[in-house]
Amino acid sequence: MNPATDGSLSTPLVMLGILLITLSGVPSLFTRKNAGFGQKLASLFVTAGAICGLIGAFSSIILNRSETFIIAWGLPFGPCEIALDPFSGLFLLPVFFISACCSIYGIGYWPAAEHAETTRKVTFFFGLTAASMAFLVMARNMVLFLVAWEVMALSAYFILAAEDHKKEVREAGFIYLAATHTGTLTLFAMFALLHHVTSSFLFPAAASIDAATPLSAAILIAALIGFGMKAGLMPLHVWLPSAHANAPSHISAIMSGVLIKMGIYGIIRVVSFFSHPPLWCGVLILAAGMTTAVLGVTFAMGQKDMKRLLAYSSIDNIGIIAMGVGVAVIGQATGSSTLAMLGMAGALLHVLNHAIFKPLLFLNSGSVIHATGTRNIEAMGGLARAMPATSILFLTGTIAICGLPPLNGFVGEYLVYLALFSGAKDGGGSSAAFMALAVPSLALTGGLALACFAKLYGTAFLGLPRSTDAEHPHEPGGTMLAPIRVLAFLALLIGLFPLLAVKLLHYPLLSWSPDLAQSGLTLSTLAPVTWITMAGVTLAVVALILYVCYSRQLKSTSRQTTTTWGCGYVRPSARMQYTGSSFTETLVHLFKGVLRPRGKEPELKGYFPATREYASNIPDLVLDLIIIPVSRGIDFGFSFVRKLQHGEYHLYILYIFVTMVALLIWAH
């Protein structure tokens, strides 16, 4: 390895972390009789590697270090270059941190004693997935990037399909493989075009390609399709809901919190290659973000499966990130440094925030599923009594994802709002109109998210148990609660002190676009966030005072237990409670043109009808209503071809003879 650096240890520390994480699952392959020991040893390796990686990434960001290493590999694809700059370092933070949290959580959630057949596979490929993501953001050679991308895709498939004895898991894995390889093929085309323009397999420097070149549009569109499919931009999201829903919860957490952000990283990195990217590109990304955000939360609202709801919510948040990226690209195209800085800052901060509160929610959902044995929120209820810690931590995540203060989700959306208002006010032409339209789109997304997660939390944790599954839940163990508490603390810390996160973004922004350094602008002046700290601390103090007063009053008064007033009913039951479906019925009906809800009304006959059941579901707009029907039509249309293959040699000889005669006649 030939370094071209100033002697810093940032990159070696990151590489050491990647190596430790890569090797973390190897010991478990040789500890068949004591798989639990191998799992714990793997978690130790991942945690140690994450600490090394975090130190290296933080030092690169804080000290503004950019380091390049050349690896001797002897392949005819140019130098094998890896690099660490503040922009890459920012994406490494969630990779290492969430990997460690999920690895520790997995010890309690996926114990080797209960999952003897899958533990070694999950442990090995978990480390490979995390390491490949970290290596991906450091790759500066196109072929090396694609190798890391494919390792990430395949290893993620094996941990996603851990329970491949289940039909729904196999189907989710197949859809994921089909989607990810479609995206990879698009990236092959994109890098081929990029190589044609630059005549090199190395990533071009920032702002080094003229956007007016004939192939620029094809490169950008291919990047949006290939990386957008991994990120989950609609309508390229088809793999994401089923994959997140059917994977083990700690795998869903790392996929949602980190893996889909590799698509966002790819889009931003490719766009940075162009000096003054075209305006249409920024408008296209902004429009895709608006569509993804609104439709993502709309579909989330109609789900009954807890993890599927969270999966669609990830699509919604990817849309918010894309809106920030779109504004930043519009700012670059129009020469507005203010738009570029605010838009990209909002996008990057929401990348970090989503990487905190979404794993927080997925890991909590794993605790709920672990305790109740079901993912159906309609079968839950009353969990807050038996699971008070999980209830509070889940509530923390729901407040954060709804973008409410004093938690971190508010801060990232605040920066995106600032960028949109700035563009709508000072911009001109169609881009200003799009940004003006994006403001109510973002507001609508926030309102629907609030309704969606009020449904989720209220149905699952409040009221009475709706089924026998929810009657005897239990709190998770220490190894499961510890990483969740750390994530909740970070969500609160960034929400109360957003200036820490804002300062962390300064050098990554300059690394992404060197032109921002020449503008003299700073994010601290463009986005004053000190008032957020003042308001957040005030709110926290008021809430603490009210809690103390309420506790004292509760202790000083006598208490008695009784049932909740049931509107005159003598014996109210759980069947009288609102279900999640009834809570959002009005909104689902409002968006029925998009959601296309399916359900069959039961027939009720006579004065005393027999027991009937009603079931409904929300199909996926693209997968269930477009791709699958079209695929079945194509399969049916070509089904006659299969009849030609009988396995009889004399028929095959006849086919060859007929073909040769036809060719001779045609040639003559």
Image (tube, rainbow, N blue to C red):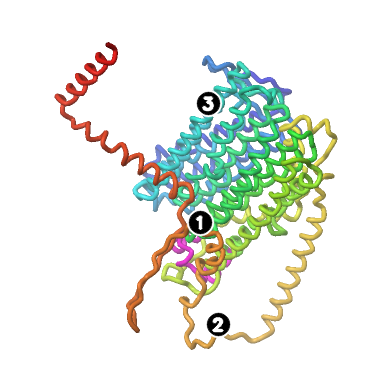
Predominant secondary structure, magenta span: helix
Give above or below for 232 relative to 605: above
Give above or below for 251 relative to 133: below
The percent coordinates of residue 352 (x first, y second) are 66, 45
Residue plotted at (50% across, 56% down):
595
Q: Secondary structure at mark 3?
A: helix
Q: Nearer the viewer, residue 95 or 466?
A: 466
Crowd around label 3: few <14 · some 14–19 · many ≥20 (10 Å): some
Q: Amino acid at mark 1?
A: Leu
Q: Quadrant of residue 138?
A: top right
* Mark closer to the chain start, 1 or 3: 3
Q: Nearer the viewer, residue 533 or 486?
A: 533
Magenta-drawn segment: 368-389
Instruction: Look at mark 2 in the image and give the residue it sits on.
Output: 564
Q: Amino acid at mark 3?
A: Ala
* Mark closer to the chain start, 2 or 1: 2
Numbered tag placed on residue 195 in the rendering: none
Q: Nearer the viewer, residue 417 or 471?
A: 417
User: Is residue 451 found left or right of 640 in the rendered image?
Assistant: right
Query: Of the residues tagged 2 and 1, which is closer to the observer?
Result: 1
Q: In whole angstroms, how far apart are the C-alphas of marks 3 and 2? A: 63 Å
Residue plotted at (79% across, 37% down):
336
Instruction: Look at mark 1 in the image and give the residue it sits on.
Output: 595
* Mark closer to the chain start, 3 or 2: 3
Give above or below for 18 relative to 524: above
Q: In whole angstroms, how far apart are the C-alphas of marks 1 and 3? A: 34 Å
Instruction: Look at mark 3 in the image and give the residue it sits on.
Output: 189
User: Is residue 125 found left or right of 284 in the rendered image?
Assistant: left
